[in-house]
Image (tube, rainbow, N blue to C red):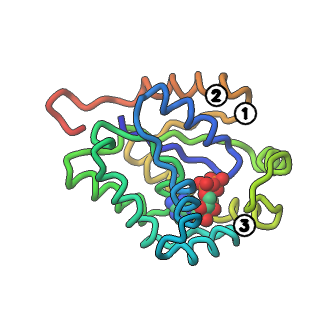
Amino acid sequence: MRIILIGPPGAGKGTQCQKLVEHLRVPHLSTGEMLRAAVRSAAPDSLLAAQCMEQGLLVPDQIIVGMVTKRLEAQDCRKGCLLDGFPRTRLQAETLDDLLERRAMSVDGVIELFVPRDELVSRMLARKRADDDPTIFSKRIASFEAQTAPLLDYYRGQGKLASIDGLGSADAIFERIKQALKRFKRPPSGGRR
Ligand code: ADP
């Protein structure tokens, strides 16, 4: 299965992704993790990426698309994957659709983790990460609202969106996600996967 998890910073994507990859037995593709690894190893373009991340801005599409394309082409992603933090812009979503279509594959479903803004801020104050400074965190929420939230309509239009209430215990939220997975239709056998 090819699933996308979308949610604002602090929505709990990391926790749910861990549970989901175990459940689906597919690789976890987190662009945030890939970028942090690229920065640690001083990979090409990583200085620009680090600057964007530190400021709570999105890393340019070109860098992200190159990174994800390479990862998606790996053998272990053939049967599916969990996309976490990607796509985050309309261009990334369209690029992903094109890329999969050329390989006769598609996204099976998109899960939105919905958490109200006040709750996101109190969660952020309770954890510590370099880009979790309150001003930067507000910018990351603003990037989400301006650039990523419109993707929800894009996937709703494709009939692929499931919106999940992101409040409650991690286990309760995961139960809701598992119910949503059941609703994602599998293509008829012999059809696109
Ligand atoms: P969160 O979802 O909590 O914001 P992530 O670990 O997914 O955290 O991302 C951290 C940062 O990495 C983002 O604020 C952004 O700067 C950058 N980033 C991650 N994924 C993308 C992407 N698909 N497009 C652009 N920038 C990205």
- Please name the residue that numbered disc 1 is placed on: 167
In the image: residue 78, left or right of residue 189: right
Q: Secondary structure at mark 3?
A: helix
The foreground one among 192 and 52 is 52
- Extreme residue in the front direction: 41
Q: Is mark 2 within 8 Å of ligand 1?
A: no
The foreground one among 70 and 82 is 70
The disc placed on residue 139 is 3
Q: Is residue 5 above or below residue 65?
A: above
- Do residues under tags 3 and 1 come within 8 Å of each other at their CB atoms? no
Residue at 32 percent across and 41 percent down: it is: 76
Residue at 52 percent across and 43 percent down: it is: 5
**Mark 2 to mark 1 CA distance (whole Å):** 7 Å
- Do residues under tags 2 and 1 come within 8 Å of each other at their CB atoms? yes
- Please name the residue that numbered disc 2 is placed on: 173
Residue type, label 1 = Leu
Q: Is residue 183 above or below residue 73?
A: above
User: Is residue 103 among the parts visible in the rendering?
Assistant: yes
In the image: residue 82, left or right of residue 130: left
Residue 186 image position (x, y, % from top left)? 30, 29
User: Within 10 Å of the Cα at label 3, are there few (<14), some (14-19), or many (20+) other Cα atoms?
Assistant: some
Residue type, label 2 = Ile
Residue type, label 3 = Lys
**Mark 2 to mark 3 CA distance (whole Å):** 26 Å
User: Within 10 Å of the Cα at label 2, are there few (<14), some (14-19), or many (20+) other Cα atoms?
Assistant: some
- Extreme residue in the left direction: 190
Q: Earlier in the sequence, mark 2 or mark 3?
A: 3
User: Within 10 Å of the Cα at label 1, are there few (<14), some (14-19), or many (20+) other Cα atoms?
Assistant: some
Residue 25 image position (x, y, % from top left)? 41, 29
